[in-house]
Image (tube, helix red, strand yellow):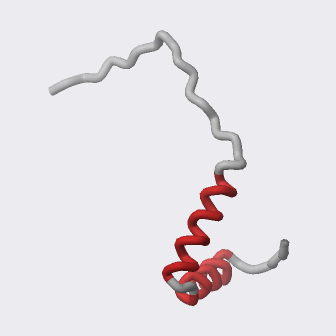
């Protein structure tokens, strides 16, 4: 793991540059790895309630 100290603008430019340097195959593998990493985080699940919402119609 690498720690970088950069501004948001610098970070975006670096990520754009890195993305453009990848081949289509590398982009796909990067996407799959990203999805695997994201799935490690627990998401907030919606609780089912007996509440209802009234919407005004025209």
> Vertical placement of 20 versus 56: above or below?
below
> Vertical placement of 6 versus 56: above or below?
below
Horizontal side of 53 relative to 40 (left or right) equals left
> Vertical placement of 49 versus 13: above or below?
above
Q: Quadrant of residue 31?
A: bottom right
The mark total stands at 0
Residue sitting at 40 percent across and 15 percent down?
52
Q: Quadrant of residue 55?
A: top left
Horizontal side of 5 relative to 50 (left or right) equals right
Horizontal side of 58 relative to 48 (left or right) equals left
Residue sitting at 53 percent across and 85 percent down?
23
For the residue pair 25 and 55, the one nearer the viewer reads as 25
For the residue pair 54 and 26, the one nearer the viewer reads as 26
Q: Position of residue 15 (x, y in %)?
A: 62, 80
Residue sitting at 49 percent across and 81 percent down?
24
Q: Position of residue 21 (x, y in %)?
A: 57, 89
Residue sitting at 65 percent across and 49 percent down?
39
For the residue pair 19 and 33, the one nearer the viewer reads as 33
Q: Quadrant of residue 58?
A: top left
Work out which quarter of the rendered image holds the N terminus and state it.
Answer: bottom right
- For this orientation, the residue located farthest to the top is 50
């Amino acid at each position: 793991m690498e720690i970088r100290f950069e501004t948001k603008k610098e970070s975006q430019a670096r990520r754009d540059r890195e993305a453009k340097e990848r081949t289509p195959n590398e982009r796909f593998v990067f996407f799959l790895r990203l999805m695997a990493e994201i799935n490690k985080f627990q998401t907030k699940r919606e609780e089912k309630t007996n509440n209802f919402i009234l919407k005004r119609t025209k």
